[in-house]
Image (tube, rainbow, N blue to C red):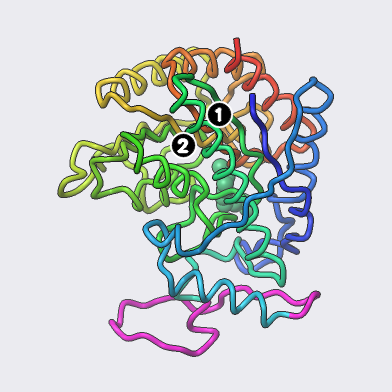
Protein backbone atom coordinates (compact mmCIF):
# COMPACT_ATOMS: atom_id res chain seq x y z
CA UNK A 1 0.00 0.00 0.00
CA UNK A 2 1.47 3.32 -1.15
CA UNK A 3 0.88 5.89 1.64
CA UNK A 4 1.49 9.64 1.51
CA UNK A 5 1.26 12.12 4.37
CA UNK A 6 2.26 15.70 5.07
CA UNK A 7 4.13 16.25 8.35
CA UNK A 8 3.37 20.00 8.28
CA UNK A 9 -0.38 19.51 8.87
CA UNK A 10 0.18 20.52 12.53
CA UNK A 11 0.32 24.17 11.52
CA UNK A 12 -3.45 24.10 10.91
CA UNK A 13 -4.94 24.16 14.37
CA UNK A 14 -8.50 25.48 14.58
CA UNK A 15 -8.85 27.01 18.07
CA UNK A 16 -12.52 25.99 18.60
CA UNK A 17 -15.87 25.39 16.90
CA UNK A 18 -18.74 27.83 17.34
CA UNK A 19 -21.82 25.80 18.23
CA UNK A 20 -25.01 27.55 19.38
CA UNK A 21 -22.98 30.71 19.81
CA UNK A 22 -20.55 29.06 22.21
CA UNK A 23 -16.91 28.12 21.76
CA UNK A 24 -16.69 24.32 21.97
CA UNK A 25 -13.54 22.18 21.59
CA UNK A 26 -12.61 21.61 17.96
CA UNK A 27 -12.79 17.97 16.87
CA UNK A 28 -10.50 18.20 13.84
CA UNK A 29 -7.22 18.31 15.79
CA UNK A 30 -3.60 17.68 14.69
CA UNK A 31 -3.43 14.65 17.01
CA UNK A 32 -5.74 12.86 14.57
CA UNK A 33 -3.22 12.63 11.75
CA UNK A 34 -0.31 12.09 14.15
CA UNK A 35 -2.08 9.19 15.79
CA UNK A 36 -2.89 7.59 12.41
CA UNK A 37 0.70 8.06 11.21
CA UNK A 38 2.08 6.46 14.39
CA UNK A 39 -0.29 3.51 14.19
CA UNK A 40 0.58 2.94 10.52
CA UNK A 41 4.30 2.99 11.27
CA UNK A 42 3.85 0.66 14.25
CA UNK A 43 1.90 -1.73 11.99
CA UNK A 44 4.80 -1.81 9.53
CA UNK A 45 3.45 0.50 6.81
CA UNK A 46 5.91 2.92 5.20
CA UNK A 47 4.86 6.58 4.88
CA UNK A 48 6.10 8.84 2.09
CA UNK A 49 6.17 12.58 2.74
CA UNK A 50 4.32 14.61 0.12
CA UNK A 51 6.58 16.12 -2.56
CA UNK A 52 4.02 17.23 -5.13
CA UNK A 53 3.00 20.91 -5.18
CA UNK A 54 -0.65 21.60 -5.80
CA UNK A 55 -1.17 23.50 -9.07
CA UNK A 56 -4.28 25.65 -8.55
CA UNK A 57 -4.91 25.83 -12.31
CA UNK A 58 -5.41 22.04 -12.28
CA UNK A 59 -8.23 22.10 -9.76
CA UNK A 60 -10.41 24.79 -11.33
CA UNK A 61 -12.96 22.17 -12.49
CA UNK A 62 -13.41 21.25 -8.86
CA UNK A 63 -13.20 24.64 -7.12
CA UNK A 64 -14.14 28.18 -8.15
CA UNK A 65 -10.99 30.20 -8.88
CA UNK A 66 -12.44 33.16 -6.93
CA UNK A 67 -12.90 30.89 -3.92
CA UNK A 68 -9.31 29.64 -4.23
CA UNK A 69 -8.01 33.22 -4.45
CA UNK A 70 -10.14 34.19 -1.44
CA UNK A 71 -8.66 31.33 0.62
CA UNK A 72 -5.11 32.10 -0.44
CA UNK A 73 -5.29 35.87 0.08
CA UNK A 74 -7.24 35.76 3.35
CA UNK A 75 -4.74 33.33 4.86
CA UNK A 76 -1.79 35.40 3.62
CA UNK A 77 -3.24 38.52 5.25
CA UNK A 78 -3.61 36.84 8.65
CA UNK A 79 -0.81 37.07 11.20
CA UNK A 80 0.57 33.83 12.67
CA UNK A 81 -1.71 34.00 15.72
CA UNK A 82 -4.84 35.32 13.97
CA UNK A 83 -7.90 33.47 12.72
CA UNK A 84 -11.20 34.32 11.05
CA UNK A 85 -14.68 32.86 11.56
CA UNK A 86 -17.68 33.92 9.49
CA UNK A 87 -20.42 35.91 11.22
CA UNK A 88 -22.83 36.83 8.43
CA UNK A 89 -24.03 34.41 5.75
CA UNK A 90 -25.54 34.85 2.29
CA UNK A 91 -29.19 35.81 2.40
CA UNK A 92 -30.23 35.20 -1.19
CA UNK A 93 -30.49 38.88 -2.13
CA UNK A 94 -28.81 38.20 -5.46
CA UNK A 95 -26.13 40.79 -4.71
CA UNK A 96 -22.45 40.28 -4.01
CA UNK A 97 -20.18 42.12 -1.63
CA UNK A 98 -16.43 42.53 -1.54
CA UNK A 99 -16.43 43.38 2.15
CA UNK A 100 -14.09 40.89 3.85
CA UNK A 101 -16.69 39.91 6.45
CA UNK A 102 -19.27 39.35 3.70
CA UNK A 103 -16.76 37.34 1.66
CA UNK A 104 -16.10 35.05 4.62
CA UNK A 105 -19.84 34.38 4.92
CA UNK A 106 -20.16 33.96 1.16
CA UNK A 107 -17.47 31.27 1.02
CA UNK A 108 -18.52 29.39 4.22
CA UNK A 109 -21.56 27.37 5.22
CA UNK A 110 -20.89 26.89 8.93
CA UNK A 111 -18.93 28.18 11.94
CA UNK A 112 -16.87 25.02 12.42
CA UNK A 113 -14.35 25.83 9.70
CA UNK A 114 -12.13 28.86 10.42
CA UNK A 115 -9.24 30.25 8.42
CA UNK A 116 -5.83 30.56 10.04
CA UNK A 117 -2.57 31.85 8.63
CA UNK A 118 -1.44 28.38 7.47
CA UNK A 119 -4.83 26.88 6.59
CA UNK A 120 -4.60 27.31 2.83
CA UNK A 121 -1.06 25.97 2.66
CA UNK A 122 -1.89 22.95 4.83
CA UNK A 123 -5.13 22.27 2.93
CA UNK A 124 -3.16 22.46 -0.35
CA UNK A 125 -0.67 19.93 0.99
CA UNK A 126 -3.53 17.70 2.09
CA UNK A 127 -4.87 17.78 -1.49
CA UNK A 128 -1.35 17.20 -2.81
CA UNK A 129 -1.10 14.02 -0.70
CA UNK A 130 -4.24 12.71 -2.39
CA UNK A 131 -3.02 13.68 -5.88
CA UNK A 132 0.39 12.10 -5.32
CA UNK A 133 -1.28 8.82 -4.39
CA UNK A 134 -3.55 9.14 -7.43
CA UNK A 135 -0.58 9.63 -9.77
CA UNK A 136 1.07 6.48 -8.45
CA UNK A 137 -2.14 4.44 -8.64
CA UNK A 138 -2.69 5.70 -12.20
CA UNK A 139 0.84 4.75 -13.28
CA UNK A 140 0.38 1.26 -11.88
CA UNK A 141 -3.00 0.98 -13.62
CA UNK A 142 -1.43 2.00 -16.93
CA UNK A 143 1.10 -0.78 -16.38
CA UNK A 144 -1.82 -3.18 -15.95
CA UNK A 145 -1.82 -3.40 -12.16
CA UNK A 146 -4.83 -2.68 -9.91
CA UNK A 147 -3.11 -1.18 -6.89
CA UNK A 148 -4.38 0.85 -3.97
CA UNK A 149 -2.92 3.81 -2.14
CA UNK A 150 -3.87 5.77 0.94
CA UNK A 151 -3.61 9.54 1.46
CA UNK A 152 -3.44 10.60 5.09
CA UNK A 153 -5.24 13.86 4.38
CA UNK A 154 -5.65 16.51 7.05
CA UNK A 155 -7.69 18.68 6.88
CA UNK A 156 -10.39 16.44 5.39
CA UNK A 157 -12.21 17.42 2.20
CA UNK A 158 -15.57 15.82 1.39
CA UNK A 159 -17.75 18.65 2.76
CA UNK A 160 -15.92 21.33 0.73
CA UNK A 161 -18.18 22.57 -2.07
CA UNK A 162 -17.23 24.15 -5.41
CA UNK A 163 -17.05 27.56 -3.70
CA UNK A 164 -17.58 26.99 0.04
CA UNK A 165 -15.69 25.65 3.03
CA UNK A 166 -17.51 23.82 5.83
CA UNK A 167 -17.51 20.71 7.99
CA UNK A 168 -13.77 21.17 8.75
CA UNK A 169 -13.05 21.00 4.98
CA UNK A 170 -11.51 23.59 2.62
CA UNK A 171 -10.42 21.71 -0.51
CA UNK A 172 -12.25 18.58 -1.62
CA UNK A 173 -9.38 16.09 -1.78
CA UNK A 174 -11.53 13.19 -3.04
CA UNK A 175 -13.13 15.35 -5.75
CA UNK A 176 -9.73 16.63 -6.85
CA UNK A 177 -8.53 13.03 -7.24
CA UNK A 178 -11.73 11.89 -8.98
CA UNK A 179 -11.49 14.81 -11.42
CA UNK A 180 -7.84 14.01 -12.13
CA UNK A 181 -8.53 10.31 -12.74
CA UNK A 182 -11.63 11.01 -14.83
CA UNK A 183 -9.36 12.18 -17.66
CA UNK A 184 -8.21 8.55 -17.87
CA UNK A 185 -11.46 6.64 -17.41
CA UNK A 186 -14.75 6.37 -15.56
CA UNK A 187 -14.44 7.03 -11.83
CA UNK A 188 -16.64 6.00 -8.91
CA UNK A 189 -16.39 7.67 -5.52
CA UNK A 190 -17.56 5.75 -2.47
CA UNK A 191 -17.94 7.85 0.67
CA UNK A 192 -18.09 5.81 3.88
CA UNK A 193 -17.58 8.71 6.29
CA UNK A 194 -20.32 9.02 8.94
CA UNK A 195 -21.43 12.31 7.36
CA UNK A 196 -22.82 12.81 3.89
CA UNK A 197 -20.18 13.83 1.32
CA UNK A 198 -22.12 16.88 0.14
CA UNK A 199 -19.20 18.57 -1.61
CA UNK A 200 -18.26 15.51 -3.65
CA UNK A 201 -21.91 14.93 -4.59
CA UNK A 202 -22.48 18.48 -5.77
CA UNK A 203 -19.18 18.88 -7.65
CA UNK A 204 -20.09 15.91 -9.89
CA UNK A 205 -23.88 16.28 -9.75
CA UNK A 206 -24.20 16.89 -13.49
CA UNK A 207 -21.43 14.54 -14.56
CA UNK A 208 -21.78 11.08 -16.10
CA UNK A 209 -17.97 10.55 -15.89
CA UNK A 210 -17.92 10.33 -12.10
CA UNK A 211 -20.46 8.20 -10.23
CA UNK A 212 -20.79 9.40 -6.62
CA UNK A 213 -22.09 7.19 -3.80
CA UNK A 214 -22.33 7.98 -0.09
CA UNK A 215 -23.46 5.91 2.93
CA UNK A 216 -24.05 8.16 5.92
CA UNK A 217 -26.16 9.38 8.82
CA UNK A 218 -29.61 10.53 7.72
CA UNK A 219 -29.23 14.28 7.12
CA UNK A 220 -32.54 14.86 8.90
CA UNK A 221 -30.62 13.72 12.00
CA UNK A 222 -27.02 14.88 11.43
CA UNK A 223 -24.78 17.37 9.64
CA UNK A 224 -24.73 18.50 6.78
CA UNK A 225 -28.58 18.53 6.98
CA UNK A 226 -29.25 20.15 3.58
CA UNK A 227 -28.24 17.23 1.39
CA UNK A 228 -27.70 13.48 1.49
CA UNK A 229 -31.28 12.32 1.01
CA UNK A 230 -32.10 9.18 -0.91
CA UNK A 231 -33.99 10.97 -3.69
CA UNK A 232 -30.90 12.96 -4.82
CA UNK A 233 -29.90 11.11 -7.98
CA UNK A 234 -28.01 13.67 -10.08
CA UNK A 235 -29.11 16.20 -12.68
CA UNK A 236 -28.93 16.60 -16.47
CA UNK A 237 -26.28 14.27 -17.91
CA UNK A 238 -25.53 13.27 -14.33
CA UNK A 239 -29.03 11.92 -13.70
CA UNK A 240 -28.67 8.43 -12.23
CA UNK A 241 -25.00 8.97 -11.35
CA UNK A 242 -25.43 9.89 -7.69
CA UNK A 243 -26.50 7.47 -4.97
CA UNK A 244 -27.22 8.19 -1.30
CA UNK A 245 -27.98 5.68 1.40
CA UNK A 246 -28.94 7.58 4.58
CA UNK A 247 -28.94 5.40 7.70
CA UNK A 248 -30.42 5.76 11.17
CA UNK A 249 -28.84 5.92 14.61
CA UNK A 250 -27.17 2.76 15.96
CA UNK A 251 -26.43 0.95 12.67
CA UNK A 252 -24.57 -2.33 13.30
CA UNK A 253 -21.82 -4.08 11.32
CA UNK A 254 -24.23 -6.48 9.63
CA UNK A 255 -26.75 -3.79 8.73
CA UNK A 256 -23.99 -1.63 7.29
CA UNK A 257 -22.54 -4.55 5.34
CA UNK A 258 -25.88 -5.18 3.57
CA UNK A 259 -26.09 -1.56 2.46
CA UNK A 260 -22.45 -1.56 1.38
CA UNK A 261 -22.97 -4.64 -0.81
CA UNK A 262 -26.04 -3.08 -2.39
CA UNK A 263 -24.15 0.17 -3.10
CA UNK A 264 -21.19 -1.71 -4.58
CA UNK A 265 -23.63 -3.48 -6.90
CA UNK A 266 -24.73 -0.09 -8.30
CA UNK A 267 -21.11 1.04 -8.59
CA UNK A 268 -20.27 -2.15 -10.54
CA UNK A 269 -23.11 -1.53 -13.00
CA UNK A 270 -21.45 1.81 -13.82
CA UNK A 271 -18.30 -0.17 -14.81
CA UNK A 272 -15.78 2.24 -13.25
CA UNK A 273 -12.10 2.06 -14.11
CA UNK A 274 -11.01 3.80 -10.89
CA UNK A 275 -12.35 3.96 -7.35
CA UNK A 276 -11.92 6.81 -4.87
CA UNK A 277 -12.83 5.94 -1.29
CA UNK A 278 -13.60 8.74 1.17
CA UNK A 279 -12.69 6.93 4.38
CA UNK A 280 -14.12 8.35 7.60
CA UNK A 281 -13.88 6.25 10.73
CA UNK A 282 -16.39 8.43 12.59
CA UNK A 283 -18.78 5.49 11.93
CA UNK A 284 -17.06 3.69 14.84
CA UNK A 285 -19.11 2.84 17.94
CA UNK A 286 -16.92 5.03 20.15
CA UNK A 287 -16.65 8.09 17.94
CA UNK A 288 -17.44 11.22 19.97
CA UNK A 289 -19.58 12.90 17.27
CA UNK A 290 -20.94 9.89 15.33
CA UNK A 291 -23.85 7.62 16.18
CA UNK A 292 -23.33 4.32 14.36
CA UNK A 293 -22.12 1.15 16.07
CA UNK A 294 -19.39 -0.17 13.76
CA UNK A 295 -16.58 -2.15 15.38
CA UNK A 296 -12.85 -2.06 14.68
CA UNK A 297 -12.97 -5.61 13.30
CA UNK A 298 -15.68 -4.54 10.85
CA UNK A 299 -13.35 -2.07 9.11
CA UNK A 300 -11.29 -5.03 7.92
CA UNK A 301 -14.40 -6.70 6.50
CA UNK A 302 -15.62 -3.43 5.00
CA UNK A 303 -12.28 -2.94 3.26
CA UNK A 304 -12.14 -6.54 1.97
CA UNK A 305 -15.61 -6.07 0.50
CA UNK A 306 -14.61 -2.83 -1.24
CA UNK A 307 -11.29 -4.28 -2.41
CA UNK A 308 -13.15 -7.21 -4.02
CA UNK A 309 -14.14 -4.74 -6.78
CA UNK A 310 -10.51 -5.17 -7.83
CA UNK A 311 -10.14 -1.58 -9.07
CA UNK A 312 -7.20 0.82 -8.94
CA UNK A 313 -8.17 2.65 -5.76
CA UNK A 314 -7.27 5.86 -3.97
CA UNK A 315 -8.30 5.89 -0.31
CA UNK A 316 -8.56 9.40 1.09
CA UNK A 317 -8.78 10.11 4.82
CA UNK A 318 -11.85 12.12 5.84
CA UNK A 319 -13.28 12.21 9.40
CA UNK A 320 -12.96 10.15 12.58
CA UNK A 321 -12.53 11.90 15.92
CA UNK A 322 -11.68 9.34 18.58
CA UNK A 323 -7.99 10.21 18.76
CA UNK A 324 -7.24 7.05 20.78
CA UNK A 325 -8.67 4.63 18.22
CA UNK A 326 -8.36 6.36 14.86
CA UNK A 327 -5.06 4.73 14.00
CA UNK A 328 -6.24 1.25 15.00
CA UNK A 329 -9.32 1.65 12.83
CA UNK A 330 -7.42 2.94 9.81
CA UNK A 331 -4.89 0.10 10.14
CA UNK A 332 -7.78 -2.39 10.37
CA UNK A 333 -9.19 -0.94 7.13
CA UNK A 334 -5.90 -0.90 5.21
CA UNK A 335 -5.06 -4.44 6.38
CA UNK A 336 -8.39 -5.57 4.94
CA UNK A 337 -7.82 -3.73 1.68
CA UNK A 338 -4.50 -5.45 1.07
CA UNK A 339 -5.59 -9.03 1.82
N1 LIG B 1 -20.21 20.06 17.76
C1 LIG B 1 -16.03 15.43 8.79
O1 LIG B 1 -16.24 14.37 9.35
N2 LIG B 1 -20.61 18.99 13.18
N3 LIG B 1 -16.63 16.57 9.17
C2 LIG B 1 -19.97 18.98 14.44
C3 LIG B 1 -20.23 18.93 16.88
C4 LIG B 1 -19.71 19.10 12.04
C5 LIG B 1 -17.60 16.56 10.24
C6 LIG B 1 -20.92 19.24 15.57
C7 LIG B 1 -19.22 17.76 11.61
C8 LIG B 1 -18.28 17.86 10.44
C9 LIG B 1 -15.01 15.53 7.72
ZN1 LIG C 1 -17.49 12.80 9.10
Question: At 37% from the left edge and 53% from the top edge, which residue is drawn?
Answer: 226
Task: Give 265 or 289, whichever is nearer the viewer.
Answer: 265
On screen, residue 238 above or below 114: above
Mark 1 vs 2, N-terminal side: 2
Magenta region includes residue 103: yes
Relative vertical location of residue 124 with respect to residue 71 in this rendering, above or below: above
* 206 lies left or right of 169: left
Residue 43 sits in quarter: top right
Q: Where is residue 26 in the image (x, y as percent from the top left)?
A: 71, 55
Instruction: Point out the stretch of residues depicted in magenta.
Output: 79-104
Observer-nearest residue: 330 or 85? 330
> In the figure, residue 292 lies in which quadrant?
top right
Q: Does the magenta stretch include residue 74?
A: no
Residue that lies at the very extreme toward the left in this rendered image: 236
Taking the image in four quarters, ligand 2 sits in the one at top right
Q: Which residue is depicted at the point 42% across and 20% down?
A: 260
Instruction: Locate residue 146, reporting x and y percent.
Output: 48, 20
- In the image, residue 143 sits, relative to residue 151, either above or below, namely above
The picture places residue 241, in percent across and down from the top left corner, at 25, 37
Name the mark on residue 292. Answer: 1
Q: What residue is rendered at 65% in x and 14% in y?
A: 297
Predominant SS of the magenta segment: loop
Q: Could you tell whether 267 is left or right of 255 in the image?
A: left
Q: Badge 2, how many Cα within 10 Å: few under 14, some, many 20+? A: many
Q: Which mark is residue 275?
A: none
Q: Are marks 1 and 2 in contact (CB under 8 Å)?
A: yes
Quadrant housing the N terminus: top right
Q: What element carries label 2?
A: strand
Q: In which quarter of the image is the C terminus?
A: top right
What is the x, y in percent for residue 80?
Answer: 79, 75
Query: Would you identify the image quadrant in which residue 242 lies?
Result: top left
| Mark 1, other Cα within 10 Å: few <14 / some 14–19 / many ≥20 | many
Amino acid sequence: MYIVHSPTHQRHQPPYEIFNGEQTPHNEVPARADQIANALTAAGYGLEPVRLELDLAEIENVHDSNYLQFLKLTCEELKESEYRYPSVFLYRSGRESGNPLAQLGNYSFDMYTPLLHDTFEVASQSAACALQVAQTVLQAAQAGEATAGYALCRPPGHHAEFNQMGGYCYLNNAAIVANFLSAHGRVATLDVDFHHGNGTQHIFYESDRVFTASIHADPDWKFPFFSGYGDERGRGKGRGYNLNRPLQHGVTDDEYQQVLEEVLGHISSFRPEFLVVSLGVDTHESDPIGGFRLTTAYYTRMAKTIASMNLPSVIVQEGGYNTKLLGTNVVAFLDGFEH
